Image (spheres, rainbow, N blue to C red):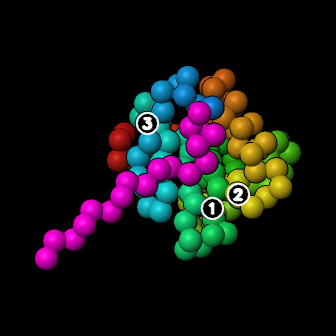
Amino acid sequence: MRRSAKPKQKAPHAFVLEALMPLNPEVRRMFSGFAIYLGDRIVCMLRDHPKSPKDNGVWLVLSDSTNPSDPELRREFPSIRAIELLRNKIGHWLLIPSDSPGFETEALHACDLVLRHDPRFGRIPKSRR
């Protein structure tokens, strides 16, 4: 008996993709979300999954030179925090949680910074180096 194919899922938080459209982002399935690439660099991941809903939202990928505990970053993104699923093993990924009051505002601010090529965001994964 053949299994029916799973319907293709769409990336959540479509407004993020819309905002990044001028840079022609590439969307790839990754773990329990959708990774957003600009060329070889991953800049964020969009997640809305019933398992571990605390980690739903926009996962920002910081550059090699960006300190995740930078106070300026914390001022610009008041709700930003570590991703529980990563168990502090990957410190350069931070979450803008989708259940925070300023989620859309903060996510769009991140998009604006990426559009302006802010050096704090994005990195080339080791598998692509």
Badge 2 or badge 1: first in the primary sequence? 1
The answer to whether one can see residue 23 in this image is yes
Badge 3 or badge 1: first in the primary sequence? 3
**Residue in the picture at 21% in, 71% down:** 3
Secondary structure at badge 2 equals loop
Residue 54 position by quadrant: bottom right
Percent position (x, y) of residue 29? Answer: 41, 52
Where 63 falls versus 83 (above or below)? above
**Disc 2, disc 1: CB below 8 Å?**
yes
**Residue in the picture at 47% in, 50% down:** 10
As for residue 118 lying within the magenta part, the answer is no
Write down the residue under mark 2.
98
Where 34 falls versus 119 (above or below)? below
> For the residues marked 2 and 3, what is the alpha-carbon distance in whole angstroms?
22 Å
Write down the residue under mark 1.
56
Where 38 falls versus 56 (above or below)? above
What is the span of residues highlighted in magenta in the rendered image?
1-18
Which quadrant, please, contains the C terminus? top left
Name the residue nearer the viewer: 78 or 64. 78
Helix, strand or loop for the magenta stretch, by majority: loop
- From this viewpoint, which residue is outermost toward the left? 1
Where 88 falls versus 104 (above or below)? below
Which quadrant, please, contains the N terminus? bottom left
Write down the residue under mark 3.
26
Mark 2 is on which residue type?
Answer: Ser
Residue 16 position by quadrant: top right
Badge 2 or badge 3: first in the primary sequence? 3
> For the residues marked 3 and 1, what is the alpha-carbon distance in whole angstroms?
20 Å
Mark 3 is on which residue type?
Answer: Glu
Secondary structure at badge 1 equals loop
Percent position (x, y) of residue 122? Answer: 56, 39
Q: Which mark is residue 108?
A: none
